[in-house]
């Protein structure tokens, strides 16, 4: 549970764990729940080791729009067998100026045959994907490639965090084993 203080500012999204109350005081845009500190907004987390405070500087930046070839981050909203709808919030290391919608077709999940998108993703998953086409602000996405797929996911049974164990994702809390198409750096990726 104890996470090491991080020296460099990291891009975080609301709900990202920033540390525990034993190491840091909650600073600006940080809240504490049951002893754990979480980011309250999208921005850069900067722990101050001297004052033992961690705060999040909101990300502003110039307007950015996803384009073909870009790597984006998003959260899975709806899923059918054929397609997942993804709310895109991040473009590479930058935060987008608005919310964009992405669609991920079952044929673009993996280089291996995937019968249903539900075998690869679940609502709430945070995924890293490549934009393969943009039409009317809707991005067609692909998660084909080792570096693409879920980077963070929760257990569908109890909501616990899924952690990588061998080649499986296992719930920290109830030990349920779940299937995902996950990125090779699953769990270690900071967005
Ligand atoms: Zn669970």
Image (cartoon, rainbow, N blue to C red):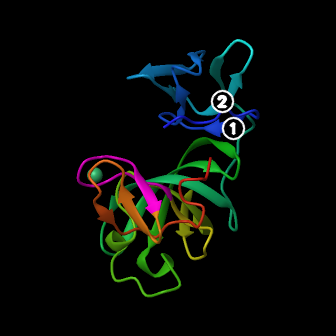
Q: Where is residue 56 in the image (x, y as percent from the top left)?
A: 63, 25
Specify the quadrant of the image occupied by residue 4.
top right
Q: x%, y% of residue 160?
A: 33, 46
Q: How many labels does the image show?
A: 2
Element type where label 1 sits in the image: strand
**Left or right, 70 with reference to 170:** right
User: Residue 159, percent across and down?
Assistant: 30, 46
Look at the image and give the residue range highlighted in magenta. 151-164
Vertical arrangement, residue 160 with respect to residue 18, above or below = below
Residue 61, position as x, y percentages in the image = 74, 35
**Residue farthest toward the left in the current orientation of the protein:** 157
For the question of whether residue 32 can be seen, the reply is yes
Alpha carbon distance from label 1 to label 2: 5 Å
Q: Which is nearer the N-term, disc 1 or disc 2?
A: 1
Q: Quadrant of residue 169?
A: bottom left
For label 1, the crowd category at 10 Å Cα-Cα, with few meaning under 14, some 14 to 19 and many 20 or more, is some
* Residue 97 is inside the magenta segment: no
Left/right of residue 13 with respect to residue 106 in the rendered view: right
Q: Residue furthest top?
A: 51
Q: Name the foreground residue: 63 vs 17.
A: 17
97 versus 119 height, above or below: above
SS at badge 2: strand
- Circle on res. 10: 1
Query: Which residue sits at x=59%, y=33%?
Result: 42
Q: Which residue lies furthest to the bottom in this view?
A: 113
User: Label 2: which residue?
Assistant: 45
The answer to whether marks 1 and 2 mark residues whose Cβ atoms lie closer than 8 Å is yes
Q: Residue at position x 54%, y 68% from top? A: 140
Residue 136 in sight in this render: no
Report if the beta carbon of the residue with label 1 is closer than 8 angstroms to ligand 1.
Answer: no
Task: Decide whether the magenta segment is chiefly helix, strand or loop.
Answer: loop
């Amino acid at each position: 549970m104890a996470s090491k203080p991080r020296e460099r500012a990291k891009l975080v999204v609301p709900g990202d764990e920033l540390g525990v109350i034993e190491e840091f005081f909650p600073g600006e845009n940080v809240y504490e729940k049951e002893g754990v500190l979480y980011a309250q907004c999208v921005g850069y987390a900067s722990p101050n080791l001297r004052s033992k405070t961690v705060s999040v500087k909101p990300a502003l930046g110039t307007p950015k729009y996803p384009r073909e070839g870009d790597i984006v981050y998003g959260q899975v909203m709806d899923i059918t067998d054929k397609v997942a709808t993804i709310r895109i919030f991040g473009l590479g290391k930058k935060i987008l100026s608005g919310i964009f919608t992405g669609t991920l077709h079952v044929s673009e999940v993996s280089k291996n045959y995937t019968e249903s998108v539900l075998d690869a993703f679940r609502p709430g998953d945070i995924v890293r994907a490549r934009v393969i086409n943009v039409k009317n602000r809707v991005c067609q996405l692909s998660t084909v490639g080792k570096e693409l797929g879920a980077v963070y996911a929760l257990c569908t049974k109890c909501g616990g965090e899924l952690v990588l164990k061998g080649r499986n994702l296992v719930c920290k809390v109830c030990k349920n084993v779940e299937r995902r198409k996950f990125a090779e750096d699953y769990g270690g990726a900071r967005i």
